[in-house]
Image: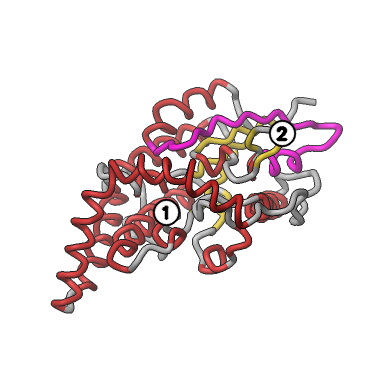
Amino acid sequence: MKPVTYVALGDSLTQGVGDPVDGAWRGWAALLAAGLGTPQRPVEFHNLAASGAQTCDVHGHQMPRALTLRPDIVSVVVGVNDTLRCTFDIGAVAGRLDEVYGAVTADGAVLLTACMPDPGAMLGLPGALGRPLARRQRAVNAVVHALSERYGAVHLHAAGEEWIADRALWSADRLHPGERGHRVFAARCHALLAAEGLASGAGPGLDPERPPPTHAASLLWLATAGTGWVARRCTDLLPQLLSLAAEEVRHRVRGTSGGLDVRAAHAATAALAGLAGVERRVEAA
C-alpha cells in the first residue's frame, strides 16, 4: 500500500523551533506525522519549512518542491514573518496564498492551515507598538480563513486568547512554542484530521518528554541567540514600526483609532476581492 505522503510548508514554527530533540528541531509537524498512518500504511514525511520564511518563500521555493513529491496532505502555516517586515502588503500575501492553496489542492491533496496569534501580543509589546502588528496579523488571519474555506482546507484556529494566555505553551523567545506547545498544536491538528477520516494513527501525547528550560537557560537564550533574532528583525521593521506607533498615538489623541482598524479591515477585504472567485466577504478572524 502506498505510504501517506505528508509535506509541511512554512516558517520556523513548522520547522520545529522551540522543540529540540537530539540536537535538531522536531516540532508539531513531525509529531503530527507520527499519528497520520498505521503500520500497514506508514507515513512519508517531508518538512520543507525554514526559519524566517515568508509567503514569498513558500510560494517561490517550498511549494514547487512539495508538488514534485505528489503529497496526500500538505500543511501551510505562514504569514507571521510577513507582518514583521517593512514590506508588508496584505494584497501580495493574499495573492501568494491563493496560488499556493490552489496548486496544493489541484491534484487532490488535503490542505491543512492555521491562523496564528499576533506577534505583538506574544512579545508583550506596549499598545502603540503592538496594535499595528495586531492589525496586520488579523488581516493575514482573515485572508487565511477566507482562502481555507474556498479550498476546503482543514483549518486550526490558533489565534485565540487561550494560546497567548498559557505561557507554559511557549518557549523563552515568546514567539515559538516549547515542547508542550508543539504537542498541543499537533494534537489539535490531528483531531481535526481524524474527524475527517484523514488520520489513522494515535494522536501525539500532550505531556512533554523533557523538563522545560530553566529560568537561567531562558535568560541565557534571550541574551545570546534571542538578542540576535530581535536585532535582525528590528533592522528591517523598527523604523517603520516607530512610524506606525507615532500614527497610533496621534489617532488616539484625536479619538480616531477606530479608523485604523477599519482601514486595515478594508485592505484585507480588497485583497480578497481582487482574487478571482473568492467571496468578497471577510470572515471574522
Q: State the extent of the magenta-drawn residues as a range.
A: 30-55
Is residue 198 among the parts visible in the rendering?
yes
> Is 36 in the magenta?
yes
Q: Is residue 36 above or below residue 128?
A: above
Q: Position of residue 29 (x, y in %)?
A: 63, 41
Q: How many marks?
A: 2
Amino acid type at circle 1 is Ala
Report whether 221 appears left or right of 268. right
Amino acid type at circle 2 is Asp
Q: Secondary structure at mark 1?
A: helix
**What residue is pinned by disc 2?**
22
Report whether 66 appears left or right of 280. right
* Residue in view at x 15 percent, y 70 percent: 250
Is residue 91 among the parts visible in the rendering?
no
Badge 1: few (under 14), some or many (20 or more) residues near its Cα, within 10 Å?
A: many
**Which quadrant is home to the C terminus?**
bottom left
Which mark is first along the chain, 1 or 2? 2
Q: Secondary structure at mark 2?
A: loop
**What residue is pinned by disc 1?**
146
Report whether 52 appears left or right of 38. left
Prevailing secondary structure class for the magenta stretch in the rendered image: loop
Q: Position of residue 225 (x, y in %)?
A: 49, 41
**Which quadrant is home to the N terminus?**
top right
* Residue in view at x 61 percent, y 58 percent: 169
Q: Position of residue 188 (x, y in %)?
A: 66, 55
